Amino acid sequence: MALRRPPTRLELKADDIEEYDDILRERANAAAASLQSNKNNKNKGNHHHPYDGAASSSSPSLSPNSKKKAEARKRIGLK
């Protein structure tokens, strides 16, 4: 039989709760700004999606998926 211990008690201060609320608010604002930016780009007539099946002009031989992988490998330092 296992020994029971009392549950761990976590104490939160008012500063912790305020900091958490600030972080949530910043994330919500960033998400709203991103959505608004996407809507503005669509309204400007820029309907080209980078992965809509057409290869970009900078690397016409790569498929969208392999181009994405190549960019990721470049970012992390692989060749």
Image: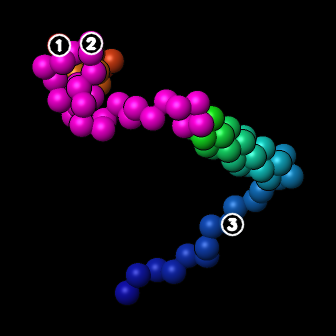
Q: What stretch is highlighted in magenta?
A: 42-68
Work out how far the residue at label 1 is from the one at label 2, CA to CA, in angstroms.
18 Å
Residue at screen point 27% across, 21% down = 56
Q: Where is residue 25 in the image (x, y as percent from the top left)?
A: 75, 46
Residue 66 lies in quadrant: top left
Q: Is residue 66 magenta?
A: yes
The amino acid type, in three-letter code, at marker 1 is Lys
Residue highlighted by disc 1: 79
Q: Does the magenta stretch include residue 62?
A: yes
The amino acid type, in three-letter code, at marker 3 is Arg
Whether tag 1 and tag 3 are in contact, CB under 8 A, the answer is no
Indicate how the structure is coloured in the image: rainbow
Q: Sequence-wise, which precedes: disc 1 or disc 3?
A: 3
Q: Which numbered dot is residue 9?
A: 3
Q: Is 19 in front, or is 9?
A: 19
Residue highlighted by disc 2: 58
Residue 6 lies in quadrant: bottom right
Q: Sequence-wise, which precedes: disc 2 or disc 3?
A: 3
Residue at screen point 13% across, 19% down = 61
| Identity of the residue furthest to the front in this view | 45
